[in-house]
Image (cartoon, coloured by chain):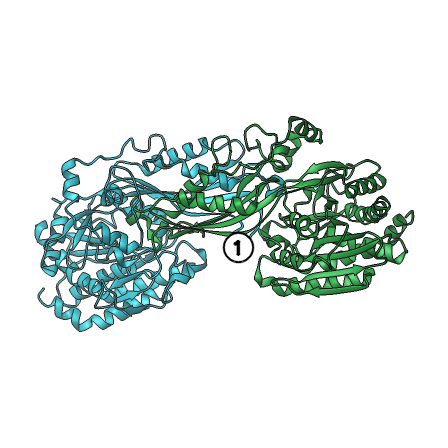
Chain colours: A cyan, B green
């Protein structure tokens, strides 16, 4: 595949422009106002897969947003790689913090990306990383370098829990049959140090509603005499962590996988500067569970974060009101062995149990997923590591990620195959934040590296 | 004044229609989007005072919204009544909970108001109650029944702290010289049991901002390792009350006036049904400071309530984000002897002191005011009580209100006169809430009762 480098450099402007066009479509799955844009993005992916050389592409209906399925089967006796990605994106707010409009992509140089980065919602998560695979396929088909069969499954609900994908996978096990699943929806340590994500955290996402009086009240006439649902909600949420920042939900830690001191020592080898970490976030101190390092807190330990809270008067100026209702969106990151449905039930039971009689509480589960681990002796992992080693000139480091791709655990259960997480983004790419971006270097390097995975995986499968 | 009843019944349709026109103007002082409406309301008040018989009316500029001043001086040797009211109103949100548009007044019958009530923002607080005084003046001037001098001072910033009024009063003590100040901006027990408010709570209103990381973060990649400003804010707010719902701010209670068991026994005589109270608010239990009754908690005890809270993702669906900032609006109701500026300083000092090093905290004071007490041996109180006794056929009960009219304490300091709080609204009139209304009976009864106050106050002043 010596010609991969030249093919990429020859077509890189087109590769970038095609991605920019894709990023212009605001495919925000969480907000129904954008539903037509989400559907339009699915159509765009279908066309892109056909052009890239798939011999069969279809848009598969689901109870929610459709799944784009494409395949290029060259020989039933050869292994099959199933590529998964998603074409939906996170909401863009707070919109006012974007330095350029989230759906008008621009290329700007940054300290981490001297060759330029594409700024747009979804640039890294996941349109940019997903599209690397489409362009890698284009290279392999156009140059006769496709060594095995390939299937694509690109969904539109990853940012809202992938419920339709779960529905689809359960019903299409034969169609989706594969030898390895390949996903680029994670990050790597730096542009000079590739890494492969070997662990993912699970997720349980709930919304809580606390109701006090049946209407908003004058805080002078009623203040002090009735339960203020906002005050009560803050007390309830605050009580979910103890003074060591341990989560207080009974049974929450029962199944948490405890790593050996040896494994923790291995993790500690990953390059990390606390000073740079604090500087990058402009914080005077870190904060978290007693007894664990920053890298452990955000990868091997479960967490509980409020992702949103609202209630009462939030406009300009002052209003002396006691709100009737207060709300919060709360998510828990889970580690391998914690079952997200079980944790969700424990949360609901506990949260209802700590509510004072003066309020009514409603907990609505949004979605969730299990954690996941890939063993590094898996040939998929080894093929990916060889590919990185060849294009970066240095082996990849195995890493546990704090993020969640709930569907990965489901793939293993339903499709009986392991997933290889070849991420090319950086933690500093601000995914889920204003000014999300994806390095041009990373995008092109991904397109270069992916065909090598196909090559080595096919060879090792013999 | 035997003809007052007939005058009111003869003109009542016009009285109601004039008020409805006034209520159509959305004079929301807290939201600058409505500033022209606030100014238009001032003009409408000026015209109304001129028509009612004032011989001099002017719109007085201030650093903020103007004050409408009017007077009818008939004899320098006679006592002077200064009427205070406000023409601004609270914001109308949550707008979706109104059964009719807040600024399109309609008359509907309710259980408490079988003769109908006018539904509109400001119907009771305070346009309706303020306008009773304008119509009472009309009666007295048109029928030669004005027994003393009268001055009107109607402001447009009561709902945002009356700062311009304070500025105005300090600069116009001579112009505002009076023997008693009359205000209708409070409530009474019921349409069959009048009451006079003899005490008001003070107020300190602040806004807090908690900043964590310098940008919104992915809760998977950073969750558990950095301070989540929303989680931290809930912990900080929760810690402001102990398990007995005592406020934990050091020094907060130092100057609180403790009532004697005798005074508390007097208060306990006011008719009150806990069952009806819970039923009216649809709550299973009350909630408040240990050791005090509901009527004590909302009148003679200081409180701390969150009036609004917001941060992170509050839209539809789920977003796994750690917000950069979280906010809350917090107000404290104060009792006589607590100084609002001192309490505000104590709050700021304490709130900053409990912030973990991992976040930055900013506290912005919005406004405040002192508490107030009127002794019942004051002739103004006695004149008001005689007026109520005559029109309602039963004496008024003196009552401490939990609400705040910060300006009342300032009047006493600057103008050296006592304020009589002749309220005609009901607690159930939903002021500051959706579907605010004011009973037609209460409106007309107020117009009937006010001239009698002038009569008896003038007689008792001889």
Does residue A459 appear left or right of residue A235 in this picture?
left
For this rendering, which residue is in front, A150 or B49? B49
Residue found 85% across the figure and 54% down from its top: B77
Relative image position of residue A402 (x, y in whole percent): 26, 46
Relative image position of residue A28 (x, y in whole percent): 39, 58
Does residue A65 appear left or right of residue B348 in this picture?
left
The quarter of the picture where residue A217 lies is top right
Residue found 15% across the figure and 53% down from its top: A76
Relative image position of residue B293 (x, y in whole percent): 61, 30
The quarter of the picture where residue B138 lies is bottom right
- Marks counted in the figure total 1
The quarter of the picture where residue A10 lies is bottom left
Q: Residue furthest right?
A: B2
For this rendering, which residue is in front, A38 or B420? B420
Give the class, few, some or many, for how many residues have Cα within 10 Å of label 1's Cα (few <14, many ≥20).
Answer: few
SS under mark 1: loop
For this rendering, which residue is in front, B436 or B411? B411
Does residue A9 appear left or right of residue B390 in this picture?
left
- Which residue carries the number 1 mark? A315
Can residue A274 be seen from the camera position used here?
A: yes
Can residue A77 be seen from the camera position used here?
A: no
Task: Specify the subunit that label 1 lies on.
Answer: A
For this rendering, which residue is in front, B357 or B15? B357
Position of A424 relative to B282 (above/below): below
Relative image position of residue B20 (x, y in whole percent): 74, 57
Position of A7 relative to B175 (above/below): below
Residue found 57% across the figure and 32% down from its top: B286
């Amino acid at each position: 595949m010596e010609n991969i480098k030249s093919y990429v450099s020859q077509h890189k402007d087109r590769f970038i422009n095609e991605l920019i066009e894709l990023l212009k479509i605001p495919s925000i799955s969480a907000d129904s106002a954008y539903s037509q844009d989400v559907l339009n993005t699915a159509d765009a992916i279908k066309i892109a897969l056909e052009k890239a050389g798939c011999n069969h592409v279809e848009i598969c209906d689901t109870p929610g947003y459709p799944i784009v399925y494409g395949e290029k089967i060259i020989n039933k006796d050869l292994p099959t790689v199933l590529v998964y990605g998603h074409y939906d994106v996170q909401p863009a707010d707070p919109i006012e913090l974007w330095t350029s409009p989230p759906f008008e992509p621009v290329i700007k140089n940054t300290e981490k990306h001297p060759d330029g980065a594409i700024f747009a919602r979804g640039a890294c998560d996941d349109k940019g990383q997903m599209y690397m695979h489409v362009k890698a396929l284009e290279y392999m088909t156009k140059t006769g370098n496709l060594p095995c069969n390939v299937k694509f499954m690109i969904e539109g609900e990853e940012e809202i829990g992938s419920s339709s994908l779960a529905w689809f996978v359960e019903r299409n096990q034969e169609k989706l049959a594969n030898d390895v699943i390949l996903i680029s929806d994670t990050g790597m340590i730096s542009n000079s140090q590739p890494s492969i994500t070997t662990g993912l955290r699970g997720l349980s996402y709930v919304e809580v509603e606390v109701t006090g009086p049946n209407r908003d009240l004058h805080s002078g006439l009623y203040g002090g005499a009735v339960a203020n649902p906002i005050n009560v909600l803050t007390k309830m949420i605050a009580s979910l962590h103890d003074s060591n920042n341990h989560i207080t939900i009974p049974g929450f830690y029962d199944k948490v996988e405890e790593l050996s001191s040896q494994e923790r020592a291995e993790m500690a080898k990953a390059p990390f500067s606390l000073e740079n970490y604090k500087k990058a976030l402009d914080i005077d101190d870190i904060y978290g569970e007693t007894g664990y390092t920053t890298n452990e807190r955000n990868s091997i330990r479960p967490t509980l974060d409020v992702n949103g809270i609202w209630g009462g008067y939030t406009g300009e100026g002052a209003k002396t009101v006691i709100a009737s209702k207060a709300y919060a969106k709360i998510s828990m990151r889970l580690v391998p062995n914690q079952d997200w449905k079980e944790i969700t039930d424990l949360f609901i039971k506990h949260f209802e149990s700590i509510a004072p009689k003066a309020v009514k509480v409603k907990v609505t589960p949004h979605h969730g997923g299990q954690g996941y681990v890939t063993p590094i002796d898996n040939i998929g992992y080894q093929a990916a590591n060889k590919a990185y080693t060849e294009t970066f000139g240095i082996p990849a480091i195995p890493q546990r990620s704090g993020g969640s791709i709930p569907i990965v655990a489901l793939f293993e259960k339903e499709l009986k195959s392991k997933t290889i997480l070849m991420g090319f983004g950086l933690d500093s790419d601000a995914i889920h934040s204003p000014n999300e971006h994806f390095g041009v270097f990373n995008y092109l390097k991904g397109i270069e590296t992916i065909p090598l995975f196909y090559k080595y995986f096919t060879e090792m499968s013999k």
